[in-house]
Amino acid sequence: MQSKILIEIPLALYYLFYFSLVAVYIIFMPKLLLDFNYNNVEVGIIYASAPFMRFIIPFVFRRFITLDHKIFVISLFLSLLSTIIFLGTIDNFWLYLLANLLFGASMGISLPYVETISLHTLSKSRYGKIRLYGSIGFMLTALWLGQVLTSAYEALYYLISFTLLTAIFGTMIIYYDQDTKMETTDHQEPFSIIKYPWFWISIFFMQVSFGGFYNFFTIYETSHGISLEMTSWMWSFGVVCEIIMLYFQGSLLQRNLLTIIQFAIIMTVIRWLILYLYPNSITMIFISQSLHAITFALYHTASISYVFSLYTQKKLAQQFFLGIAFGLGGSVGALLAGKIYGESMFLIEALIAILSLIAISRHSSKQI
């Protein structure tokens, strides 16, 4: 019991700094790449590379590597190394692309491992209260850098610092993770995504629909006359709503997880339609951002909890969830967003979210 209480501190701090570095990478770097004469397609390719590696990594681990403490520490070191390499390569598209591939591979190992430890160690309600520290880190970083950031190199210094702190507290997690049962559950039965095809198709399309938001929201809003500072407040408001949901979602997660997932996807469709219809309305954009509580926080927790209940190979299941959703879905979403960026981008994203809803409905009907 004492070890479970002690592990909550490094878990919370890992989430805090992990999602702080994600904030730098997602919110500010895409727009700053334009200062290095990257075009929209090149930005899409760069931001497809890291998610693509997250998709490839689970297949490598399924056949050749066992995800353990040692591999986890190596992934933390490679994450830090890749961000340092960013400094010397950002002005060269191809070298920067290679560095992003390394970054994506290492990040594709780190987070799934920590998520499995959290789900195994914490209750559903407690998980949300620890995971919300990640949202706090994301929000504070968005607010701070929205006011002080002046160059891509300055953003990279923040990125390196947050990655270093993530590595430190990630290593501390291992010290307190003494539960040997979790090391053996990954070998009870063969892992198969074919067993639940419609579920995996749904999470893929859901994340594809986020491609325009994650990679072009800042560019999209500033092009419609919204200031960078106001856009950072919009990001932060969405995260505040996310934090509130993470704190209070425990009772909701006691209900049917598939119903929650379906509801969250419906809200995602509405969210993208609002951004399509009212791109320069600050009020409507804040309303759409409030839906982040459902479309990300509640959806994410319900989904990883559902995956955790489906498979005995817990760590591998989380790797595949993040690999297919944020990896393949994120990669395709980033590439697609680079191609379709324009006035109709979020209308297309809404249609993609509808495909996700159709797929999860098919999965749900087969589970009855």
Image (cartoon, rainbow, N blue to C red):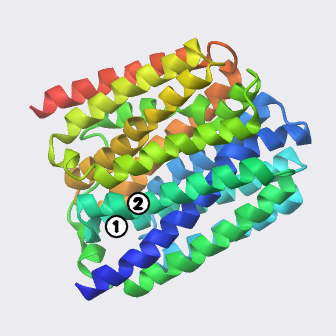
Q: Quadrant of the C terminus?
A: top left
Q: Amino acid at mark 2?
A: Arg
**Residue 141 picture quarter:** bottom right
Q: Quadrant of the N terminus?
A: bottom left
User: Closer to the camera, 24 or 316?
Assistant: 24
Lateral position of residue 20 relative to residue 243, left or right: right
Residue at 27% x, 52% y is 305
Residue 91 rendering spot, x and y as whole percentages:
90, 49
Lateral position of residue 211 relative to residue 35, left or right: left
Residue 2 rendering spot, x and y as whole percentages:
27, 87
* Residue at image mark 2: 131
Image vertical order of residue 166 relative to residue 213, above or below: below
Residue at 36% x, 28% y is 265
User: Closer to the camera, 237 or 328?
Assistant: 237
**Residue 118 picture quarter:** bottom left
* Residue at image mark 1: 118
Q: What whole-number distance in Å separates the C-alpha atoms at marks 1 and 2?
A: 9 Å
**Residue 17 picture quarter:** bottom right
Dot 1 lies on which element? helix
Does label 1 or label 2 sit earlier along the sequence?
1
Whether residues under marks 1 and 2 lie with C-beta atoms below 8 angstroms apart, the answer is: yes
Which residue is at the far left? 368
Q: Amino acid at mark 1?
A: Ser
Residue at 15% x, 26% y is 365
Instruction: Check residue 73 in the rendering and tell me which mark sits there, or answer none.
Output: none
Q: Is any part of residue 198 visible from this angle?
A: no
Residue 57 rendering spot, x and y as whole percentages:
51, 56
